[in-house]
Image (cartoon, rainbow, N blue to C red):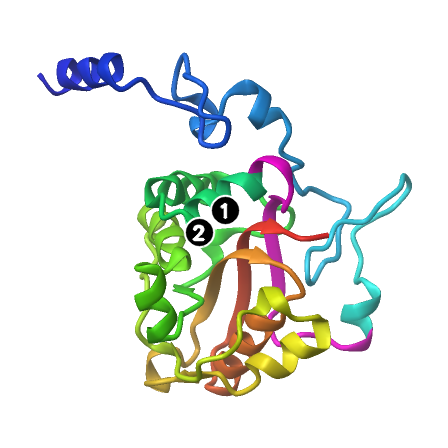
Amino acid sequence: MKRFLSGLADIIFPPRCLTCDSILDNQENHALCPACFSKIKFIKSFLCTCCGIPFYGAGESDHLCGDCLTSKPAFSVARAVGRYETTFLDAIHSFKYRGKTTHGKILGKLMAEYEYPSFSISDYTLIMPVPLHPKRLRERGFNQSVILAREIAGRFPIPLDFLTLKRYMYTEPQINLGKKDRESNVRGAFKVMEPDRIKDQRIILVDDVYTTGSTVKECARVLMKSKARAVAVLTLARAV
């Protein structure tokens, strides 16, 4: 009966591509049509072994980028599924700014299933989404990072903690700021409420987009200061 009802729903409300809204023949490629899926630029080697920024040109190998060599972040590794453009840009905007939370669940499953270079989700012991300030949460109605993190935690036997790390300082949206201003904007904005919950934990910090990394770097700094063993950053997209 369940299969019958699902099939009936597909006839009445046929599944559509997340980004172009075309009708899908099946549910493969994470609810993306072949044309939109083919536009995703997945991030593989060659990249920075720390922050995960991809390198250009042939003959490269995985190594630290200039920024990580001169100013190593508090996190040990950051990885993303693909570049923040075309398909991912459209899908994230639809999810984040137009409230299509079902899109977020599909994108979270993609994050959970992706094979990241030199990184394994199962090596970690706790999953934490980047928190929103309560005012921003009321404005948006949901935290996109929680939705993504919940899908990842649902695939792995790793606890999800969205209460211990708090954003208690309301700041200007990062999208309007340059790199240096972004760093100062989030400095001191996060706080660990109960440090014992994260002591000696290997934490995956989840967000939707890695742009300059200012937000996740500050979150990782606070978590490491509270004696986390290691912090990794996992995002759906990476701005390059």
Is 78 colored magenta in this rendering? yes
Is 194 colored magenta in this rendering? no
Residue on which disc 1 sits: 93
- CB within 8 Å, label 2 to label 1: yes
Real-space Cα distance between discs 2 and 1?
Answer: 5 Å
| 53 vs 136: above or below | above
How far across and how far down the image is residue 236, in percent? 53, 48
Number of residues whose C-alpha sits closer than 10 Å to that of mark 1, classed few (under 14), some (14–19) or many (20 or more): few
Q: Secondary structure at mark 2?
A: helix
21 relative position to 117: left or right: left
The single residue placed furthest to the left in the displayed view is: 1
How far across and how far down the image is residue 122, in percent? 45, 53
Residue 186 image-quadrant placement: bottom right
Residue 164 image-quadrant placement: bottom left
Give the residue type at disc 1. Answer: His
- The disc placed on residue 162 is none
How far across and how far down the image is residue 195, in percent? 37, 85
165 relative position to 41: left or right: left
| 33 vs 166: above or below | above
Task: Please identify the quadrant where the N terminus is shown.
Answer: top left
Residue on which disc 2 sits: 97
Give the residue type at disc 2. Answer: Tyr
Pick the front one: 213 or 200 = 213
Residue range corresponding to the magenta coloring: 70-87
Q: Secondary structure at mark 1?
A: helix
